[in-house]
Image (cartoon, grey):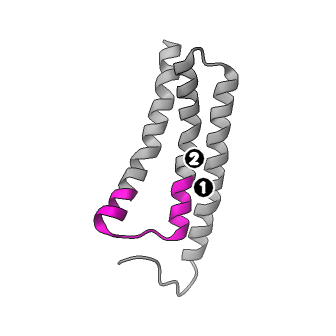
Amino acid sequence: MFKRLAFLLPHLCVLGLLVPLVGAFVVQFGLGEFPCPLCLLQRMAMLLAAVGPAWIILAARKGEVTPADVATGGGLSVVAAVVGACISGRQVLLHIMPGDPGYGGT
């Protein structure tokens, strides 16, 4: 049961990270609403956060998953998430300035 759950959770994590990215790409390419540079950086951080669980999935497909594999995958995700949070914080700080016209269509 534990092995099956340990194999299922990284799949759910990758899926959870890729669903908003697919939505963002649909808005970008389908509706022609181009993202700002900070939005692009946030997308890259989300893709990098998906690399950690993908690392664990690849290790599981090769054979036994070791604690080192889980630590490496988790570490990759945490570093990417912290970078994405810093980028997101910067974007929020830019948009709360008085007189900011915003970006994109209304």
Indicate whether 7 appears above or below 15: above
From the top left corner, tell me how far across and down residue 37 is, in percent. Answer: 53, 69
Near-viewer residue (85 or 61): 61
Q: Amino acid at mark 1?
A: Gly
Q: Quadrant of the C terminus?
A: bottom left
Query: Few, some or many C-alpha atoms within 10 Å of disc 1 (few <14, some 14-19, many ≥20)?
Result: many
Q: 95 or 71, which lies in front?
A: 71
- Residue 104: x and y in percent read 41, 76
Which type of secondary structure does the marked residue at label 1 adopt?
helix
Check contact, mark 2 vs mark 1: CB within 8 A.
yes
Q: Which mark is residue 71?
A: none
Instruction: Find residue 80 and report its horizontal and vertical position in percent.
Output: 63, 48
- For the point 65% across and 43% down, the residue is 78
Quarter of image, res 56: top right
Q: Is residue 94 above or below residue 89?
A: below
Image position of 61 with respect to 33: above or below: above
Residue furthest toward the front?
62
Q: Specify the quadrant of the image occupied by residue 70.
A: top right
Residue 48, label in figure: 2
**Residue lying at 61% horizontally and 49% vertically, measured from the top left:** 81
Q: Main secondary structure of the magenta part?
A: helix
**Kind of element beneath mark 2:** helix
Tell me where residue 17 appears, x and y as whole percent.
Answer: 47, 44
Q: Name the amino acid, label 2.
A: Leu
80 in relation to 88, above or below:
above
Q: Is residue 20 magenta?
A: no
How far apart are labels 2 and 1 at the CA level?
A: 9 Å
Q: Which residues are magenta?
A: 24-44
Disc nearer the start of the sequence (2/1): 2
Q: Residue at x 51, y 56 (%)?
A: 43
Label 1, on which residue? Answer: 84
